Image (cartoon, helix red, strand yellow):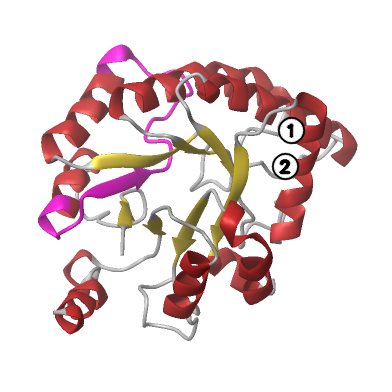
Amino acid sequence: MTYTVNCSILLTELPLLERPAAAKAAGFDAVEFWWPFETSVPTDAQVTEFETAIKDAGVQLTGLNFNAGNMPGGDRGLVSWPARSTEFQDNIDVVAGIGERLGCKAFNALYGNRIDGESPEKQDAIGAENLATAAAGVARIGGTVLLEPVSGAPKYPLLTAEDALKVIARVKAESGAQNIKLLADFYHLAVNGDDVESVIENHAKDFGHIQIADNPGRGAPGTGTLPLGEWIARSRELGYGGYIGLEYKEPQESAFNWAIRQRANAN
Protein backbone atom coordinates (compact mmCIF):
# COMPACT_ATOMS: atom_id res chain seq x y z
CA MET A 1 0.00 0.00 0.00
CA THR A 2 1.37 3.39 -0.96
CA TYR A 3 0.65 5.81 1.87
CA THR A 4 1.56 9.47 2.10
CA VAL A 5 1.73 11.19 5.51
CA ASN A 6 -0.10 14.50 5.86
CA CYS A 7 2.47 16.45 7.85
CA SER A 8 0.07 19.30 8.59
CA ILE A 9 -2.20 17.20 10.80
CA LEU A 10 0.22 14.46 11.92
CA LEU A 11 3.50 14.77 13.83
CA THR A 12 2.39 18.18 15.08
CA GLU A 13 4.47 17.78 18.26
CA LEU A 14 7.43 18.62 16.01
CA PRO A 15 8.26 21.86 14.21
CA LEU A 16 6.79 21.78 10.70
CA LEU A 17 10.11 21.40 8.91
CA GLU A 18 11.14 18.44 11.07
CA ARG A 19 8.07 16.41 10.18
CA PRO A 20 9.18 15.07 6.76
CA ALA A 21 12.23 13.46 8.37
CA ALA A 22 10.04 12.03 11.12
CA ALA A 23 7.72 10.52 8.52
CA LYS A 24 10.74 8.97 6.82
CA ALA A 25 12.00 7.60 10.15
CA ALA A 26 8.57 6.01 10.70
CA GLY A 27 8.94 4.10 7.43
CA PHE A 28 7.16 6.30 4.91
CA ASP A 29 8.59 7.63 1.66
CA ALA A 30 5.95 10.24 0.83
CA VAL A 31 4.39 13.28 2.49
CA GLU A 32 1.69 15.84 1.75
CA PHE A 33 0.99 19.25 3.27
CA TRP A 34 -1.70 21.83 3.66
CA TRP A 35 -0.35 25.26 2.67
CA PRO A 36 2.65 25.59 5.00
CA PHE A 37 2.99 29.38 4.90
CA GLU A 38 1.02 32.26 6.39
CA THR A 39 0.66 34.15 3.11
CA SER A 40 -0.14 33.26 -0.48
CA VAL A 41 3.24 34.54 -1.63
CA PRO A 42 5.92 33.65 0.93
CA THR A 43 9.50 34.82 0.61
CA ASP A 44 11.96 32.91 -1.54
CA ALA A 45 13.86 32.01 1.63
CA GLN A 46 10.75 30.48 3.21
CA VAL A 47 10.02 28.43 0.11
CA THR A 48 13.61 27.22 -0.12
CA GLU A 49 13.61 26.23 3.54
CA PHE A 50 10.45 24.16 3.03
CA GLU A 51 11.75 22.48 -0.10
CA THR A 52 15.10 21.72 1.52
CA ALA A 53 13.39 20.01 4.48
CA ILE A 54 11.61 17.65 2.12
CA LYS A 55 14.66 16.96 -0.03
CA ASP A 56 16.92 16.39 2.97
CA ALA A 57 14.40 13.96 4.46
CA GLY A 58 14.50 11.87 1.31
CA VAL A 59 10.72 11.80 0.86
CA GLN A 60 8.50 12.60 -2.10
CA LEU A 61 6.04 15.48 -1.83
CA THR A 62 2.86 13.99 -3.27
CA GLY A 63 0.32 16.69 -2.46
CA LEU A 64 0.15 20.36 -1.56
CA ASN A 65 -2.82 22.59 -0.77
CA PHE A 66 -3.27 26.01 -2.26
CA ASN A 67 -3.48 28.67 0.44
CA ALA A 68 -6.76 28.08 2.29
CA GLY A 69 -6.60 31.12 4.59
CA ASN A 70 -6.58 30.88 8.36
CA MET A 71 -7.61 27.25 8.86
CA PRO A 72 -7.48 27.33 12.71
CA GLY A 73 -9.64 30.44 12.55
CA GLY A 74 -12.28 28.71 10.45
CA ASP A 75 -11.30 29.60 6.89
CA ARG A 76 -11.69 26.78 4.39
CA GLY A 77 -10.24 28.12 1.18
CA LEU A 78 -10.02 31.21 -1.00
CA VAL A 79 -11.33 29.79 -4.28
CA SER A 80 -14.87 31.19 -4.04
CA TRP A 81 -14.12 34.13 -1.72
CA PRO A 82 -14.60 37.27 -3.84
CA ALA A 83 -12.54 39.61 -1.67
CA ARG A 84 -9.56 37.24 -1.75
CA SER A 85 -9.74 36.08 -5.35
CA THR A 86 -6.60 37.95 -6.36
CA GLU A 87 -4.76 36.46 -3.41
CA PHE A 88 -5.71 32.98 -4.59
CA GLN A 89 -4.57 33.73 -8.12
CA ASP A 90 -1.24 35.06 -6.83
CA ASN A 91 -0.78 31.76 -5.01
CA ILE A 92 -1.02 29.63 -8.16
CA ASP A 93 2.45 30.33 -9.54
CA VAL A 94 4.04 29.73 -6.13
CA VAL A 95 2.27 26.37 -5.79
CA ALA A 96 3.20 25.35 -9.32
CA GLY A 97 6.82 26.34 -8.73
CA ILE A 98 7.11 24.20 -5.62
CA GLY A 99 5.43 21.35 -7.46
CA GLU A 100 7.79 21.65 -10.38
CA ARG A 101 10.93 21.65 -8.24
CA LEU A 102 9.79 18.77 -6.00
CA GLY A 103 7.98 16.65 -8.57
CA CYS A 104 4.57 17.10 -6.92
CA LYS A 105 1.56 16.79 -9.23
CA ALA A 106 -1.52 17.01 -6.97
CA PHE A 107 -2.81 20.32 -5.59
CA ASN A 108 -5.85 20.60 -3.33
CA ALA A 109 -7.94 23.75 -3.74
CA LEU A 110 -10.32 24.18 -0.82
CA TYR A 111 -13.45 25.81 -2.20
CA GLY A 112 -14.16 28.27 0.60
CA ASN A 113 -17.01 29.04 2.96
CA ARG A 114 -20.13 30.92 2.03
CA ILE A 115 -19.48 34.59 2.79
CA ASP A 116 -22.07 36.85 4.39
CA GLY A 117 -23.17 39.55 1.97
CA GLU A 118 -22.15 37.62 -1.15
CA SER A 119 -24.61 35.62 -3.21
CA PRO A 120 -23.93 31.90 -3.69
CA GLU A 121 -24.26 32.47 -7.44
CA LYS A 122 -21.49 35.07 -7.46
CA GLN A 123 -19.28 32.90 -5.29
CA ASP A 124 -19.79 29.88 -7.51
CA ALA A 125 -19.02 31.86 -10.66
CA ILE A 126 -15.79 33.17 -9.14
CA GLY A 127 -15.02 29.70 -7.81
CA ALA A 128 -15.33 28.16 -11.26
CA GLU A 129 -13.13 30.85 -12.79
CA ASN A 130 -10.44 30.45 -10.15
CA LEU A 131 -10.42 26.66 -10.41
CA ALA A 132 -10.00 26.97 -14.17
CA THR A 133 -7.12 29.41 -13.67
CA ALA A 134 -5.51 27.05 -11.15
CA ALA A 135 -5.92 24.10 -13.52
CA ALA A 136 -4.21 26.06 -16.28
CA GLY A 137 -1.46 27.12 -13.90
CA VAL A 138 -0.49 23.60 -12.86
CA ALA A 139 -1.14 22.02 -16.27
CA ARG A 140 2.27 23.23 -17.43
CA ILE A 141 3.92 20.85 -14.96
CA GLY A 142 1.49 17.99 -15.55
CA GLY A 143 -0.40 18.82 -12.36
CA THR A 144 -3.97 18.17 -11.27
CA VAL A 145 -6.23 20.38 -9.17
CA LEU A 146 -8.18 18.51 -6.49
CA LEU A 147 -11.55 19.53 -5.06
CA GLU A 148 -12.96 17.96 -1.90
CA PRO A 149 -16.09 17.88 0.23
CA VAL A 150 -15.36 18.91 3.83
CA SER A 151 -17.06 18.22 7.16
CA GLY A 152 -17.12 20.28 10.32
CA ALA A 153 -17.33 23.65 8.54
CA PRO A 154 -20.95 24.88 8.69
CA LYS A 155 -20.56 27.42 5.88
CA TYR A 156 -18.64 25.17 3.48
CA PRO A 157 -21.03 24.32 0.61
CA LEU A 158 -19.44 21.15 -0.75
CA LEU A 159 -20.58 18.34 1.56
CA THR A 160 -20.98 15.35 -0.74
CA ALA A 161 -19.04 13.92 -3.64
CA GLU A 162 -21.88 15.01 -5.90
CA ASP A 163 -21.53 18.61 -4.71
CA ALA A 164 -17.87 18.65 -5.70
CA LEU A 165 -18.45 16.76 -8.95
CA LYS A 166 -21.02 19.36 -10.04
CA VAL A 167 -18.44 22.11 -9.59
CA ILE A 168 -15.85 20.06 -11.46
CA ALA A 169 -18.30 19.50 -14.31
CA ARG A 170 -18.98 23.24 -14.49
CA VAL A 171 -15.29 24.08 -14.64
CA LYS A 172 -14.72 21.54 -17.40
CA ALA A 173 -17.71 22.76 -19.40
CA GLU A 174 -16.84 26.45 -19.10
CA SER A 175 -13.06 26.26 -19.51
CA GLY A 176 -12.26 22.96 -21.16
CA ALA A 177 -9.89 22.10 -18.31
CA GLN A 178 -9.52 18.36 -17.84
CA ASN A 179 -6.97 18.32 -15.01
CA ILE A 180 -9.40 18.83 -12.13
CA LYS A 181 -10.54 15.83 -10.09
CA LEU A 182 -12.36 14.77 -6.95
CA LEU A 183 -10.40 14.35 -3.74
CA ALA A 184 -12.25 11.53 -2.00
CA ASP A 185 -11.68 12.00 1.71
CA PHE A 186 -13.49 8.99 3.12
CA TYR A 187 -13.72 10.55 6.58
CA HIS A 188 -15.38 13.77 5.41
CA LEU A 189 -17.76 11.87 3.12
CA ALA A 190 -18.80 9.46 5.87
CA VAL A 191 -19.30 12.19 8.48
CA ASN A 192 -21.44 14.17 6.04
CA GLY A 193 -23.67 11.15 5.47
CA ASP A 194 -22.61 10.44 1.90
CA ASP A 195 -22.91 6.91 0.52
CA VAL A 196 -19.19 6.17 0.36
CA GLU A 197 -19.65 2.74 -1.20
CA SER A 198 -21.71 4.25 -4.01
CA VAL A 199 -19.19 7.03 -4.56
CA ILE A 200 -16.45 4.43 -4.88
CA GLU A 201 -18.46 2.24 -7.27
CA ASN A 202 -19.31 5.16 -9.52
CA HIS A 203 -16.18 7.30 -9.40
CA ALA A 204 -13.12 5.46 -8.05
CA LYS A 205 -11.45 5.24 -11.43
CA ASP A 206 -11.63 9.03 -11.65
CA PHE A 207 -10.50 9.89 -8.12
CA GLY A 208 -7.66 12.38 -8.09
CA HIS A 209 -6.64 11.39 -4.56
CA ILE A 210 -7.90 9.50 -1.50
CA GLN A 211 -7.46 10.58 2.11
CA ILE A 212 -8.45 8.61 5.19
CA ALA A 213 -9.23 8.96 8.88
CA ASP A 214 -11.49 6.85 11.06
CA ASN A 215 -14.77 7.92 12.60
CA PRO A 216 -15.72 8.86 15.25
CA GLY A 217 -12.89 11.15 16.24
CA ARG A 218 -10.89 11.54 13.03
CA GLY A 219 -8.33 9.17 14.50
CA ALA A 220 -6.02 6.56 13.03
CA PRO A 221 -7.36 3.60 11.05
CA GLY A 222 -8.80 1.05 13.46
CA THR A 223 -9.78 3.55 16.13
CA GLY A 224 -13.33 3.88 14.80
CA THR A 225 -15.86 1.98 12.76
CA LEU A 226 -15.22 2.92 9.13
CA PRO A 227 -14.28 0.00 6.82
CA LEU A 228 -11.32 1.93 5.44
CA GLY A 229 -9.42 -1.14 4.29
CA GLU A 230 -12.39 -2.39 2.30
CA TRP A 231 -13.00 1.01 0.74
CA ILE A 232 -9.35 1.34 -0.29
CA ALA A 233 -9.26 -2.19 -1.71
CA ARG A 234 -12.42 -1.62 -3.73
CA SER A 235 -11.10 1.70 -5.05
CA ARG A 236 -7.97 -0.11 -6.20
CA GLU A 237 -10.03 -2.82 -7.89
CA LEU A 238 -11.96 -0.18 -9.79
CA GLY A 239 -8.90 1.60 -11.08
CA TYR A 240 -7.59 4.05 -8.50
CA GLY A 241 -3.82 3.84 -8.61
CA GLY A 242 -2.68 6.79 -6.53
CA TYR A 243 -1.50 7.41 -3.01
CA ILE A 244 -3.60 7.07 0.14
CA GLY A 245 -3.26 10.22 2.21
CA LEU A 246 -3.06 9.73 5.99
CA GLU A 247 -4.95 12.77 7.25
CA TYR A 248 -5.97 11.93 10.80
CA LYS A 249 -5.26 13.08 14.35
CA GLU A 250 -3.11 10.86 16.53
CA PRO A 251 -0.23 11.51 18.96
CA GLN A 252 3.22 10.97 17.50
CA GLU A 253 4.04 7.99 19.71
CA SER A 254 1.05 6.00 18.45
CA ALA A 255 0.42 7.64 15.08
CA PHE A 256 1.52 4.70 12.97
CA ASN A 257 0.99 1.68 15.25
CA TRP A 258 -1.72 0.40 12.90
CA ALA A 259 0.71 0.49 9.97
CA ILE A 260 3.36 -1.38 11.92
CA ARG A 261 0.81 -4.10 12.69
CA GLN A 262 -0.24 -4.15 9.06
CA ARG A 263 3.34 -4.62 7.91
CA ALA A 264 3.89 -7.38 10.47
CA ASN A 265 0.81 -9.23 9.27
CA ALA A 266 1.98 -8.95 5.68
CA ASN A 267 5.33 -10.64 6.43
Rendered location of residue 238, percent (x, y)? 55, 65
Q: Main secondary structure of the magenta part?
A: loop
Asked if residue 217 shows in the view, the reply is: no
**Foreground residue among 186 and 199:** 199
Would residue 191 be found to the left or right of residue 259 on screen? Answer: right
Q: Residue at x 21, y 35 (%)?
A: 54
**Callout 1: few (<14), some (14-19), or many (20+) C-alpha neighbours within 10 Å?**
many
Callout in the foreground (1, 2): 2
Q: What range of the chain is rendered magenta?
A: 24-45
Q: Residue at x 68, y 26 (%)?
A: 132
- Residue with the mark numbered 1: 127
Picture layout, residue 165 above or below residue 189: above
**Foreground residue among 69 and 159:** 159
- Identified by mark 1, the residue type is Gly
- Identified by mark 2, the residue type is Ile
The quadrant in which the C terminus is found is bottom left
The quadrant in which the N terminus is found is bottom left
Label 1: which secondary element: helix
Rendered location of residue 173, percent (x, y)? 81, 33
Give the spatial CA distance, label 1 vs label 2.
10 Å
- Asked if the residues shown at circle 1 and circle 2 are in contact, with their CB atoms under 8 angstroms apart, the answer is no
**Callout 2: few (<14), some (14-19), or many (20+) C-alpha neighbours within 10 Å?**
many
Q: Earlier in the sequence, mark 1 or mark 2?
A: 1
Q: Residue at x 74, y 27 (%)?
A: 176
Picture layout, residue 223 above or below residue 107: below
Label 2: which secondary element: helix
Would residue 24 be found to the left or right of residue 116 on screen? Answer: left
Check residue 168 in the rendering and tell me which mark sits there, or answer none. 2
